[in-house]
Image (cartoon, coloured by chain):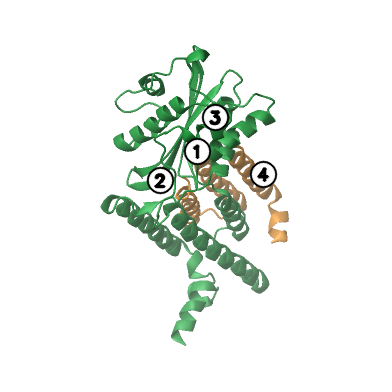
């Protein structure tokens, strides 16, 4: 009975909780914030204590990235890009370099630019570009994110590019296992010596150091954060709605924040939470 | 609740309009979580400032209410930014 009474005070307004469910009183909101921060700290500590235990399982393949990139170009009325094993080598080297030196950017902390990777594989270009993505689960999501980003989209549908190379590499970055996707675009200075070929099936015989993504992930930190946040939001929203209905019926007068204001604000944030997506671009 | 809206129509219209703008801007920046994070922080700050205006208009602005809104805004901002990489 005592437990029931405590639950009542926690979730429903009552004279003993000052006519307001405890869960939506400032003290309990502060406790929820502390619990959430604790959860985030545990996840962060895990990535330091046991690197690789956190991660993003991925089904990304270079062939699908290539296929979808050309599909977007065709949709834009452009010619498809030829697949270049040299550019794939430079893209894969870039991804490996990011893992080796633990950075996530176009330029490395040692000052290496994307163009250094092109030069390292002896790719002579008149124009070149680079797209990066990490922490995505599938190729469709990567492509969707790139196409939604004006700068990445500009690379994908740039009519000046003739060739593409793709690197999809798994590894541990900042203690979290992830998949890095690198697109290298280019137009060779002298097309006669270019190694590019089309269609992509033809390059299957060319040995490229391509690590295809398929990780054995234990805990996905994004999913954990999303589930914990979602549960907290849902509980608070339900309690707020029930509280608003009960106090309206009882015509309770109390000095408290506007229930309608809290519900509207948290509902919008909850909707945004549902639409937060995976992955980041560079 | 409808009575509350009618009584403070301008205040609630401001809130709904602000939240709608936040929603649209968030989806506009769907390609970049860094911008999305700024939108969330901006929305939380907007909500907190709105609460000051709302309760000032109502004439019941108190320190305990300021703390409550601050915690709600912080709660929302923290929880959602934790899901943005």
Q: Nearer the viewer, mark 2 or mark 4?
A: 2
For the residue labelled by badge 2, is the local secondary structure a helix, a strand or a loop?
Answer: strand
Relative height, residue A123 to residue B61 (above, below): above
Asked if labels 2 and 3 touch by Cβ distance under 8 angstroms, the answer is no
Q: Would residue A258 be found to the left or right of residue A178 on screen?
A: right
Labels 3 and 1 within one chain: yes
| Residue receiving disc 3 | A152
Q: Disc 3 or 1, which lies upstream in sequence?
A: 1
Closer to the camera: disc 1 or disc 4? 1
| Secondary element at tag 4 | helix
Return the x and y of residue A128 as percentages of the image width and height.
49, 19
* Disc 4: which residue: B17
**For discs 3 and 1, the disc positioned in front in the rendered view:** 1
On the same chain, marks 1 and 4? The answer is: no
For image coordinates 56% across by 21% down, the residue present is A162
Chain identity for the colour green used in the image: A
Q: Is residue A128 left or right of residue A52?
A: right
Q: Are marks 1 and 2 in contact (CB under 8 Å)?
A: no
- Residue at label 2? A178
The answer to whether any part of residue A7 appears in the image is: yes
Compare residues A117 and A266 and report the one nearer the observer. A117
Q: How many marks?
A: 4
Q: Are marks 3 and 4 on the same chain?
A: no
Q: What colour is chain B?
A: orange
Q: Which residue is mark 1?
A: A62
Choose between A234 and A55: the one closer to the eye.
A55
Labels 3 & 1 near each other (Cβ < 8 A): no
Residue furthest out toward the left: A49
For disc 3, the chain is: A
Residue B30 visible to an observer of this rendering: no
| Residue at the far bottom in the pictured view | A1
């Amino acid at each position: 009975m005592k437990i029931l009474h405590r639950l009542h005070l926690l979730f429903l307004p009552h004279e003993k909780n000052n006519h307001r469910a405890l869960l939506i009183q400032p003290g309990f909101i502060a406790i929820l914030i502390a619990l959430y921060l604790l959860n985030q700290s545990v996840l962060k500590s895990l990535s330091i204590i046991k690197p690789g235990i956190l991660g993003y399982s991925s089904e990304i393949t270079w062939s699908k990235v290539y296929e979808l990139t050309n599909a977007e170009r065709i949709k834009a009325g452009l010619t498809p890009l030829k697949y270049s094993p040299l550019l794939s080598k430079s893209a894969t080297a870039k991804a490996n370099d990011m893992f080796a030196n633990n950075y996530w950017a176009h330029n490395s902390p040692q000052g290496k630019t994307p163009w250094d990777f092109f030069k390292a594989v002896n790719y002579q270009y008149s124009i070149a570009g680079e797209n990066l993505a990490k922490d995505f689960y599938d190729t469709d999501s990567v492509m969707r994110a790139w196409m939604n980003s004006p700068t990445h989209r500009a690379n994908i549908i740039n009519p000046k590019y003739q060739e593409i190379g793709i690197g999809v590499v798994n590894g541990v970055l900042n203690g979290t296992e992830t998949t890095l996707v690198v697109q290298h675009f280019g137009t060779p200075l002298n097309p006669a010596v270019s190694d590019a070929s089309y269609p992509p099936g033809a390059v299957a015989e060319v040995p490229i150091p391509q690590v295809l993504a398929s990780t054995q992930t234990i805990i996905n930190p994004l999913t954990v954060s999303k589930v914990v946040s979602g549960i907290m939001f849902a509980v608070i929203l339900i309690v707020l709605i029930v509280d608003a209905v009960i106090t309206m019926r009882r015509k309770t007068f109390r000095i408290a924040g506007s229930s309608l204001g809290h519900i509207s604000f948290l509902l919008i944030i909850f909707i945004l939470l549902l639409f937060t997506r995976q992955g980041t671009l560079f | 609740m409808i009575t509350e809206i009618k009584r403070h129509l301008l205040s609630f219209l401001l809130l709904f309009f602000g939240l709608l703008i936040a929603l649209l801007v968030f989806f506009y920046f769907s390609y970049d979580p860094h911008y999305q994070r700024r939108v969330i922080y901006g929305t939380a700050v907007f909500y907190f400032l709105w609460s000051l205006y709302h309760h000032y208009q109502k004439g019941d602005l108190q320190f305990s209410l300021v703390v409550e809104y601050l915690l709600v805004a912080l709660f929302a901002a923290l929880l959602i930014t934790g899901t943005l990489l």
